[in-house]
Structure formats: structure tokens, C-alpha cells
């Protein structure tokens, strides 16, 4: 979601010889700027669903006629044969993350199940193992509640500073947040394969855009409302109260215990996130498989780039009045919900741990996905 005003501001500042710090997304609190951001994010897309999403949100928008024309062209064009589907195993917990400068772009390793040894006498099934207790901040303990459940990382939260006074106005003011409740958050974004299990259960909608997309790509083109369907289904299957992370939980997890602009430091470095110009693997049409880039210090992958991620909170244009305990901020109108983290289509300036934006809760967009969370108390 690029805003032209970002380029203009950077150009003007550079022209007067002032040093320019990398900027995050710059949403202005006006309908015109949000519409422009929406259009800029899809204007080169080859997905009909992107233009349908724009027309749903802005049926009389500035680019409505162009959107309809491109939509008609895409629907009239012969469909290229999709590559055969190559199902991939569910992502397995990755080893301890390498230092950023040693990061390698490889998909998560396969985890093969070891068959149990045969026994002479039948034994009662063992009691379910208790979920690992979250250790101190920075430790990595993984949880998998059921066969269909995403792998999660258990975190024991600590107070941290959320937001920034040096970037986008929506990220201000930087403020202390004291998270008190341990929680678990998805190690990876929800994948296409995991979503398909919900589709087979006749709960989640079957997206036409999925086609023969491999199972290990992050699920995208899903609205906030549709993400709730998946969470309710997963809660029923697992018996655990799944939800989206709160915005504060998301940023705490994304920072990985750091206080720098990115979890790897204050300067943008390639090889740490899936974004345009940030290193391989990269494809203009879709994000890479989950876990293709190194995990952050909390053992979480793809918090920066890949796909924008829905969180629980309603949109507020600043942090003035935000909860200081890490709970979801749901006061006021909730037609627009917060998305975090940027996507593979944005450049490195969107990869800051503080980058945030908004989207209509009922609108699908091909860059939007999510990861799961649940409280551990």
C-alpha cells in the first residue's frame, strides 16, 4: 500500500539536503488518502479479486471506472493453465534463529512422525501432554493443540514501548505497555493448507483465488470477518479459545524483545523479510512459502513482510487513549480493523516493527492474511 505522498515528502526533504530516516506507511486520516493507498496497492495486480475488493469498498471511487475496465479485461482473458498443486507438509518448528547476517532463505524443515514401537499388550492412551509453560522473554516454547492447529510460540510478556515518535503519525505517541497474561501466537501465518481444512469442514469459504496454490503459502485474500470463521472452527476442533492477537501482542511478538526499528537493528537489511527489493526468494505475484526467511529472536517467522496481518483491534488514527495493558482496543466504530507488518509487495521502508494500517473488516484484499493467538491463562 504505497502512498504517493510518501514519495513526495521524501523527494522534497532530500531536495533541501536534510537526512531522511526510513519511513513507514503514512496513512492520513482522510477517506481520500485511504482510497489512494488502496488503489496504489492493487493497480498493477493481475488478480480480479483485487479490483472486486476495491469496487466493494469504493463503488463510486476515483478509480472505479478503471477498476471495472481492468476487471472486465481479466475476466475476458483466457486463463493460463495453473501449475499442478504441490502439497507441502505443515511447517515444523524451526531451530534457534541465526543472526541476521547469517540468515538463509530456506523453507521450514519437514518434520516426519516417528512410528511408535509395537507393544505386546494394549495400553490405555496417554493423557494429553500439558502445553509447555512460556519461559522468560526471548525463549522459544512451541505449542500444537491439535493435528489441524498451527504451531504456536508461547511467550511470557514483559513491559515494552509500543509505537514510535519518529515515524508515521498513527504510530504516536510511543507508550509503555505492560502485558501481564502469557499468550501464544502463531509461529507462521495461517497457511493455504490450514485454511483448506476449514473449507473441507464447510465452515470457511473456498476462495476462487486459491486455485492450485501450494499448501505452504500464507493464506491471503481473506477479510477480517472471514478470519473469524476460521478461528471459531479451530476453537471447536481444538477445544481452545483461539483468536487474533491484539495489536499490542502483535507488536511485542514482532519486536522479539528488541527496541530497534526492525528486530534485526536500526537499519534495513536484506534477507530478513519478504518484501520488494529485500532479497530472494521473491515473486511479484505471490509471497514465498511460510518460513522462507529467518525467525526473529522469539522464534517467529514472517512478522515483517509476507502478508499484512489482521489483529483484533479497531482502527484508531493515533495511540492517544490506547490501553496500556495490551488488551484489544475495540471502542468506537469497528468497521475498520488494524493490519500490521507490511507485505511482500511493499519495499523495506514498510518492514518496521511499528508499521500499521487499516482495512474494512468485510473487504478481501490479496495482500491481507493473519496468524492465530490464544491466552495461556
Image (spheres, rainbow, N blue to C red):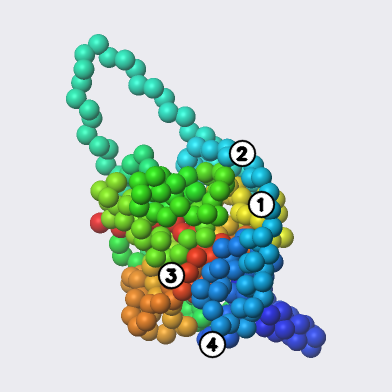
Indicate the position of residue 343 as horizontal and vertical percent values: 59, 62
Numbered-mark total: 4
- Dot 1 or dot 4: first in sequence order is 4
Asked if residue 23 shows in the view, the reply is no
Residue indicated by mark 1? 79
Determine contact: label 4, label 3, CB under 8 Å. Answer: no
Q: Position of residue 151 (x, y in %)?
A: 42, 46
Q: How far apart are the two marked residues, 4 and 3, measured between alpha carbons?
A: 19 Å
Asked if residue 194 lies left or right of residue 76, the reply is: left
Instruction: Looking at the image, tell me whether mark 2 or mark 3 is earlier in sequence order.
Output: 2
> Residue most toward the front?
76
- For disc 2, the marked residue is 84
Give residue 121's quadrant in the image.
Answer: top left
Q: Nearer the viewer, mark 1 or mark 2?
A: 1
- Residue at image position (48%, 79%) is 174
Mark 1: secondary structure: loop
Q: Earlier in the sequence, mark 3 or mark 1?
A: 1
Q: CA distance from mark 4 to mark 2?
A: 44 Å
Q: Which residue is mark 3?
A: 362
Residue drawn where x is 54% and y is 79% of the image: 59
Q: For residue 30, which numbered disc appears in the image?
A: 4
Amino acid at each position: 500500500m504505497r502512498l504517493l505522498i510518501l514519495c513526495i515528502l521524501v523527494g522534497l526533504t532530500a531536495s533541501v539536503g536534510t537526512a531522511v530516516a526510513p519511513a513507514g506507511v503514512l496513512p492520513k486520516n482522510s477517506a481520500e488518502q485511504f482510497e489512494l493507498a488502496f488503489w496504489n496497492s492493487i493497480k498493477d495486480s493481475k488478480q480480479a479479486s483485487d479490483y472486486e475488493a476495491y469496487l466493494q469498498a469504493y463503488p463510486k471511487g476515483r478509480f472505479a471506472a478503471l477498476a471495472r475496465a481492468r476487471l472486465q479485461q481479466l475476466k475476458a482473458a483466457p486463463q493460463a493453465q495453473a501449475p499442478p498443486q504441490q502439497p507441502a507438509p505443515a511447517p515444523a518448528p524451526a531451530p534457534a534463529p541465526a543472526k541476521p547476517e547469517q540468515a538463509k532463505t530456506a523453507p521450514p524443515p519437514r518434520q516426519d512422525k516417528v512410528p511408535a514401537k509395537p507393544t505386546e499388550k494394549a495400553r490405555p492412551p496417554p493423557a494429553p501432554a500439558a502445553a509447555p509453560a512460556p519461559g522468560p522473554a526471548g525463549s522459544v516454547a512451541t505449542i500444537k493443540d491439535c493435528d489441524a492447529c498451527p504451531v504456536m510460540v508461547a511467550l511470557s510478556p514483559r513491559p515494552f514501548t509500543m509505537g514510535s515518535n519518529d515515524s508515521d503519525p498513527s504510530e504516536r505517541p510511543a507508550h509503555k505497555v505492560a502485558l501481564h497474561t502469557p499468550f501464544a501466537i502463531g509461529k507462521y501465518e495461517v497457511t493455504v493448507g490450514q485454511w483448506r481444512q476449514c473449507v473441507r469442514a464447510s465452515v470457511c469459504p473456498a476462495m476462487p483465488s486459491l486455485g492450485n496454490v501450494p499448501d505452504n503459502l500464507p493464506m491471503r485474500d481473506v477479510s477480517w470477518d472471514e478470519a473469524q470463521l476460521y478461528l471459531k472452527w479451530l476453537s471447536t476442533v481444538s477445544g481452545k479459545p483461539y483468536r487474533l492477537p491484539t495489536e499490542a501482542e502483535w507488536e511485542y511478538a514482532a519486536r522479539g524483545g528488541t527496541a530497534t526499528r526492525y528486530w534485526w537493528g536500526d537499519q534495513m537489511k536484506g534477507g530478513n523479510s519478504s518484501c520488494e527489493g529485500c532479497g530472494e526468494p521473491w515473486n511479484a505475484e505471490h509471497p514465498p512459502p511460510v518460513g522462507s526467511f529467518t525467525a526473529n529472536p522469539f522464534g517467529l517467522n514472517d512478522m515483517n513482510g509476507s502478508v499484512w496481518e489482521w489483529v483484533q483491534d479497531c482502527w484508531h488514527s493515533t495511540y492517544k487513549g490506547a490501553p496500556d495493558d495490551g488488551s484489544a482496543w475495540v471502542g468506537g466504530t469497528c468497521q475498520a480493523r488494524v493490519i500490521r507488518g507490511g507485505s511482500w509487495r511493499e519495499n523495506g521502508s514498510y518492514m518496521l516493527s511499528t508499521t500499521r494500517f487499516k482495512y474494512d473488516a468485510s473487504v478481501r484484499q490479496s495482500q491481507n492474511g493473519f496468524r492465530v493467538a490464544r491466552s495461556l491463562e
